[in-house]
Amino acid sequence: MKIAGIGFRAEAPTASLQDALNQTGHAVDAIATAADKADAPQIKELAEILGVPLIAVPLDELSQEITITQSPRVAERYGTGSLAEAAALAAVGENAHLLDRRVTSTDGMATAAIAEGPDA
């Protein structure tokens, strides 16, 4: 199973989230983000467009994930280096691994990273 972790600014349009996801080059089975972002209309719309579930990752689980990318701003807010990478890893669960480091949308408003587990 492949899950996309999505990070985004509050003012990011759905198109930015979709652009970041498209840049990963992967089809996904679900998308995930931090629980405090999961009610945002743009992430809900992206899940609807893709026809996949949206996973709201509890904030304490994000801080347990070790990420490739290190953003001081994200580390201060979420206790991890990349929201997209941490959300993807946490949503997949035990023995998850990233397919690559996170990518950023063309406008810089959203990020996406793909993780999969041993059963993928």
Image (spheres, rainbow, N blue to C red):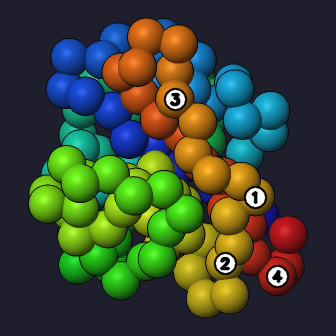
Q: Secondary structure at mark 2?
A: loop
Measured from the top left, where is residue 43 in percent x and y?
A: 38, 32
Task: Answer whether labels 1 and 4 touch (C-beta < 8 Å).
Answer: no
Q: Give the secondary structure at mark 1.
A: loop
Among numbered discs 4 and 2, the one appearing first in the sequence:
2
| Residue 90 against residue 32 in the figure, above or below | below
Secondary structure beneath label 4: loop
For disc 1, the neighbor class at 10 Å (few under 14, some 14 to 19, many from 20) is: some
Residue at mark 1 to residue at mark 2: CA–CA distance: 10 Å
Amino acid carrying mark 2 in the image = Ala
Question: Are the residues flagged by discs 4 and 2 in contact, CB closer than 8 Å?
Answer: no
Q: Which residue position is annotated with label 4?
A: 118
How far apart, in angstroms, are the residues tagged by discs 4 and 2? 7 Å
Q: Which mark is residue 104?
A: 3
Mark 1 sits on what residue? 99
The residue type indicated by label 3 comes to Thr
In this view, the residue in front, 23 or 93, is 23
Q: Are marks 3 and 1 in contact (CB under 8 Å)?
A: no
Relative horizontal placement of residue 98, taking residue 119 as reference (left or right): left
Judging from the image, what secondary structure is the residue with disc 3 in?
Answer: strand
What is the count of numbered marks?
4
Rendered residue at 23%/54% (across/down) = 72
Task: Answer left or right for 47 relative to 95.
Answer: left
Give the foreground label among 1 and 2.
1
Q: Are marks 1 and 2 in contact (CB under 8 Å)?
A: no
Q: Which residue is mark 2?
A: 96
